[in-house]
Amino acid sequence: MKCVVVAAALAAAPAYAGEAPVRNWNGVYVGANIGGGWGSNSVGYAPNDPQAVNLFGSGGKPPPAAFDFSGVLGGVQLGYNHQFSSAWLIGVEADFDGSGVSGSGSTSGVFAPYYTAPFNAPVQQRLDWFGTLRARLGYLPTNNLLVYGTGGFAYGRVVQSGSWDTNTPFAFGGGAYDVNCFGGNPSCFAGSSSRVATGWTAGAGLEYAILRD
């Protein structure tokens, strides 16, 4: 979710036939936005080797971790409006935003059944940037006020990282991996990934024309 502040260029125009003069919302506009995002997420695990049962028991994996995320975001947008009556318009808008939205959490347990070493599994996730491409439908209750709904395509770069840490030294070998948790390196497993996630977005908003024609 984001709060948007829009600056748009507006021009005067003749009245529609039989109507009083109205503000013309037709044309291209550019703007800037700043706001915040928040939500919740969870990370689960899937065993990728039969030997995982020797570390985590019959489930072969640690329990999932849930966490909240939040942060500041901001960027720019470009759009076009077509006003087809004194009260209605349609349009298209694209925006691109940098993001400081991130969150972290952890889960814990015991390596079992053959090893009784307790472990902690911290995870982190952040959204580096995102963009949208949306259609808009707007209604003008007054000349200066636009109420609109919007929806369309969204994409963004998501980065995730995690590890399984323990302070109890032990070693285990076999299958597709070796586990060696000794000395000053308590992270038995560690990894990260990044991807461009895609999805949809929908919302509503208000725009108000401050300057006179």
Image (spheres, grey):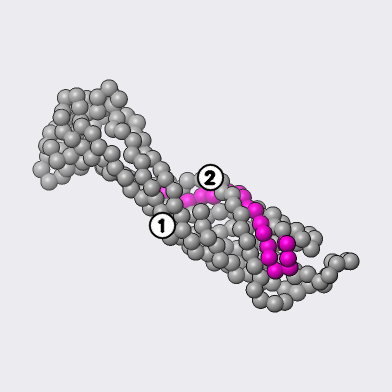
Q: Which residues are magenta?
A: 140-162
Whether residue 156 is in magenta: the answer is yes
Q: Position of residue 109 (x, y in %)?
A: 23, 34
Q: Earlier in the sequence, mark 2 or mark 1?
A: 1
State the residue position of label 1: 71
Q: Position of residue 19 (x, y in %)?
A: 85, 67
State the residue position of label 2: 199
**Residue that appears at 27% across and 22% down:** 58
Label 2 and label 1: CA atoms lie apart by 20 Å
**Residue that appears at 47% across and 46% down:** 197
Q: Position of residue 57 (x, y in %)?
A: 24, 24
Q: Are dots 2 and 1 in contact, CB under 8 Å?
A: no
Whether 178 is drawn above or below 2: the answer is above
Q: Position of residue 17 (x, y in %)?
A: 88, 66
**Residue that appears at 29% across and 42% down:** 106
Find numbered disc 1 in the image and state the secondary structure of the residue it sits on: strand
**Residue that appears at 67% across and 59% down:** 147
Q: Is residue 159 visible?
A: no
Q: Nearer the viewer, mark 2 or mark 1?
A: 1
Question: Magenta residues: mostly which secondary structure?
Answer: strand
Taking the image as shown, residue 113 lies to the left or right of residue 93, namely: left
Rendering quarter of residue 29: bottom right
Taking the image as shown, residue 177 lies to the left or right of residue 27, namely: left
